[in-house]
Amino acid sequence: MAEFIMKRLVRHAGLENEFEIASAAISDEEEGNPVYPLAKRKLAEHGIGCPGKTARQITPDDYSHYDMIVAMDEGNIRGLARFFGNDPEGKFSRLLDHVPPTDVKHHGRDIADPWYTRKFDVAYDDISTGCQALFEELVKH
């Protein structure tokens, strides 16, 4: 969901040529699968499409290719560190780390995976809030 929420923010700002946004998983268990139907439905409720998207696993080249690698939770950060052999350039962050500390509901916490919690509304709210904060942070620099 984060990939498509962020792409919409960038597109609405007319900055799609300034950003490359992609999502990937640490594991390969979903590789090639389309967006999970309940996630796709939640995005559609907000007017966001994700046509043709299939899951892919991160690759060793992703670390050098991307300026930032943003995860949903601390478990993802640990998985990324194992996969890439740590984070020498400080590219890893959790999405809600970008939310200002004044937003006590969101700042600095993990986003629970809605596949497990079944709370797609909560996940959408958290992801949307995080993407908005990250976008604002990036356009200020």
Image (spheres, rainbow, N blue to C red):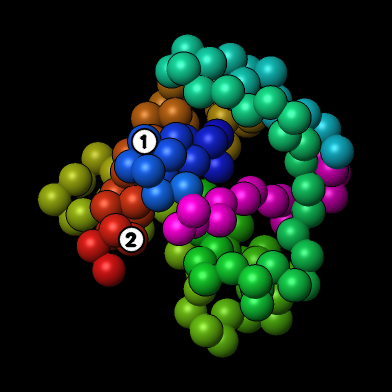
**Image vertical order of residue 5 relative to residue 136, above or below:** above
Residue range in magenta is 17-31
- Chief SS of the magenta region: loop
**Camera-nearest residue between 1 and 110:** 1
**Camera-nearest residue between 107 and 20:** 20
**Residue 22 colored in magenta in the image:** yes
Instruction: Kindly identify the amino acid type of the residue bearing the numbered disc 1.
Output: His
Q: Percent from the top left, x then y, of residue 141?
A: 27, 68
In this rendering, position of residue 30 left or right of residue 106: right
Dot in front, 1 or 2 = 1
Q: Percent from the top left, x then y, of residue 92?
A: 51, 69
Mark earlier in primary sequence (1, 2): 1
Q: Percent from the top left, x then y, of residue 66?
A: 59, 68
Residue linked to disc 2: 138
Q: Percent from the top left, x then y, of residue 86?
A: 63, 80
Query: Which part of the image, by quadrant, shows the N terminus?
Result: top right
**Camera-nearest residue between 41 and 81:** 41
Residue linked to disc 1: 12
| Residue at (23% x, 62% y) in the render | 140
The span from disc 1 to disc 2 (Cα, nearest Å) is 15 Å
